[in-house]
Amino acid sequence: MKQVAIVISLFLVFACSQKQEQETHYFTNPILAGFYPDPSICKVGDDFYLVTSTFAYYPGLPILHSKDLVNWETIGFAMDRPEQLNLDGHGVSRGLFAPAIRYHNGLYYITCTLIDTGGNFVITATDSAGPWSDPYWIPEVNGIDPSMYFDEDKAYIIYNSIPPDNKPLYGGHRTIRMFEFDVDQMKVKGEEMLLVDGGVDISKNPVWIEAPHIFKKDGYYYLICAEGGTAYNHSEVVFRSDNARGPYVPWDKNPILTQRHLDPLRPNPITTAGHADFVRLDNGDWWAVFLGCRPYADKDYFNTGRETFLTPVKWIDGWPVINPDFEEVQYRYPVPISGTTPAAPSYSRFNYRYEFDEDKLHNNFQFLRTVRDVWYSFSEKPGHLTLNVRSETCSGKMNPSFVAHRQPHLSGSVSTSLAFLPGAENEMTGLMVFQNETHFYFLAKTLIEGRPVVALYQSSTDGQEMQLQASEAIDNEVVRLKIEARNETYAFFFSAAEGDWTLLKEDVDARFLSTREAGGFVGCMYALYATSHGKESASVAHFDWVEITTSDNP
């Protein structure tokens, strides 16, 4: 059922390029633009399902559906109940790490890690859209990135873990381990098995072997893993064995995917490629989804986080190679499945306008940490999203009045229409671009010296906000706010009611919000936000719509 009115309008220039792509049967990477890291995929009949990490965002673990591997729709979330997912106190880059989705005998399985709170778990569902079960915790799995593998009448759970005897030989020394798994009891069984120690060649001190998945082809069991860490040195490697339990032998031509050896000054680079998962089509073709980044400067700055890319896989001498015909990951490839009619809007190049005229948020929005109290409404002012102005702030580690949408591209804009009458100078409501608790810009309507204004604030490490610019007094209750992303800078605008846009400040440093400077594993979010900075408030803010535009550059 349609959840909120959405108007999708493509740029004319993109419409032309999209028409050309359709005529030549190409798709555009990334297939999931913006903060969609650690993808895992499975095929069930003619349907594909994909899940990615969400860290401290709620609901957790989006379930994306596609018929063609290219056009995706979020049909639900695997962890959408407070009793399933407690994110209180989690930093933005903690929470849910690296899920894996599998299907077996009528049941969907997701394995994942909840850092700092519960550890590793399995959840199940008979319907991919949910509801999903409460977590079955697996305390014996000591590590991260668990993945299920079903081999006829046996099931296994594979994961990143500690070095032998928990005595690392060097920094980043990890292992890949496995248990047999009892799916009836939802428990491990038997003894833990060590599959990989260190990585492809431990004599070279490989770091952060993780994200394991096992597949079977032509009598061999293939184990693919990420290696090198999820930043610039990221890669994907492969091992194989004639027994699911090993021993596993690495390919002598590893890695099967990396971009770390390429010139960082090349045009429109895609970096950090790794953390892959495979899917096999009915015609026998294999494809890989994996994470990558699109930086905007020569020092690997990016604000959109780690995104999901799609490339073909070719089997060469009995081994899989990702992106086999190119050295660089490409922005365009021939479509995997021809003749498919898109069932959902593209998450690669799009314009969205969200009209809040139904009683539920669109699945493209998420909250910061677990929502327990009802602090937003669609009925208080029909056709609007109403936020209570609450004491919680986005600099804390609880759940503020914060409704977020991924920044999909390095170039584009987000805008909204806001009706708000601040009652005190501590009350601020508006539009922000947010990376984490200490790295954000906030374009807010507030009071300064008793006058209602639009002001721009920058976060600081002490939890306070520094004012960068403020407008003259604004008498209108309704204002429009806009943030333009311009690769390495942002520009901030406002407008009284339906008037022309007024520039408040431009050339604001985007690198402050980049992963390189801010740290962590997430990407920037555009957020509707309301706070009274620790004080009680009875004020509310009404948002009429949100519009997100995307340029047509890589």
Image (cartoon, grey):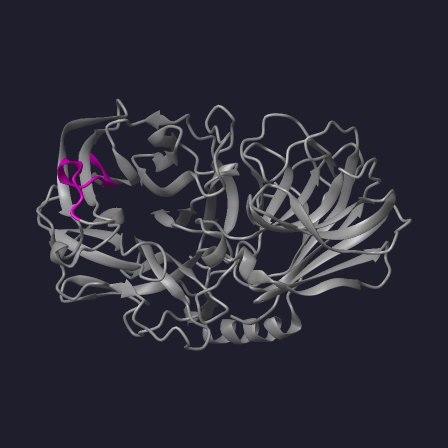
Could you say where residue 252 lies in the image, as x and y percent from the top left?
A: 12, 64
- Asked if residue 544 lies left or right of residue 344, the reply is right
Q: Nearer the viewer, residue 421 or 194?
A: 421
Q: Residue at x 88, y 52 (%)?
A: 473
Is 8 placed above or below 532 here? below
- Asked if residue 261 lies left or right of residue 435, the reply is left
Is 222 placed above or below 329 here? above
- Asked if residue 327 lies left or right of residue 552, the reply is left
Q: Nearer the viewer, residue 21 or 206?
A: 206
- Asked if residue 170 lies left or right of residue 46, the reply is left
In the rendered image, is residue 218 in sight? no
Q: Which residues are magenta?
A: 155-169
Looking at the image, the residue that sits furthest to the right is 475
Q: Residue at x 48, y 34 (%)?
A: 90
Q: Nearer the viewer, residue 138 or 20?
A: 138
Q: Is residue 339 magenta?
A: no
Q: Quadrant of residue 261?
A: bottom left
